[in-house]
Amino acid sequence: WSAVNSHFILGIIGFSAMLWLRAYVMLLAAKASNKLMVAASTGTAAALCLIVSIVNRGVEAGGGNADDSYGHSILDLFQHYASLLLAAATNTESPGPLQFSAMILEITSLGFLFVVLLQENDASFEEQIDEDSCPIDLYDILEDDEEVAKLSPKEKEKLETCIVLEEKERSTLSFVEEEEEKQRQFDESGDSSVNVM
């Protein structure tokens, strides 16, 4: 039951984290205000605190007596579950190398997650330039000598590539429009020469 309870609470925490992450990403993409992001984050955090509080009380109560209790909080529950996993993985009669590997990989994964959470922030992500996109004001930039002087050779090459691609797209569109016009004129001239008996 320790494993069932632990996986249940981890699932609920994971579900709450996914709800928060979805709300955050959607609001970030919509360029929502910081106040709205804080409101969504605190609402999700409040629900998570309530869920963990309920589970804490259940863990503390256990099966109704001191023998069936895993401890006083979910941290004690997780500690009990981890000790059971470690005991099963290092059992001399029936070792579990995959269980042990899973534990090591999960610890590694969580370590890297905490490093990312502590060292990176949204500002560094938002300031990254999308290297595959062309600026909307492409022609305005190229007509302004001061702006062109500020560009690095790589940025100038990128802008020139963008212009070439845009001219190809325009020529393709004009060719398609010409062909459609020729087809329309052909259809009109063909329809007028048909005699009805």
Image (cartoon, helix red, strand yellow):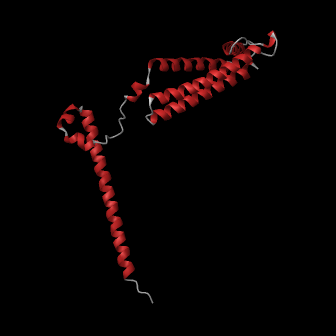
Residue 117 in picture, x, y percent from top left: 49, 20
> Could you tell me how many numbered marks the image carries?
0
Left or right, residue 154 beside residue 146:
right
Q: In which quarter of the view is residue 109 placed?
A: top right
At 58% from the left edge and 17% from the top edge, which residue is drawn?
107
Quarter that holds the N terminus? top right
Nearer to me, 96 or 67: 67
Quarter that holds the C terminus? bottom left
At 24% from the left edge and 39% from the top edge, which residue is drawn?
141
At 66% from the left edge and 23% from the top edge, which residue is drawn?
51
Nearer to me, 63 or 51: 51
Residue 160 in picture, x, y percent from top left: 25, 42
Residue 146 in picture, x, y percent from top left: 18, 34
Nearer to me, 167 or 188: 188
Residue with the most extreme top position: 66
Q: From what the image shows, is residue 194 above or below residue 21?
A: below
Residue 98 in picture, x, y percent from top left: 66, 21
At 56% from the left edge and 19% from the top edge, which residue is drawn?
110
Q: In which quarter of the view is residue 43 placed?
A: top right
Q: In which quarter of the view is residue 183 placed?
A: bottom left
Residue with the most extreme left position: 145
Left or right, residue 47 beside residue 150:
right
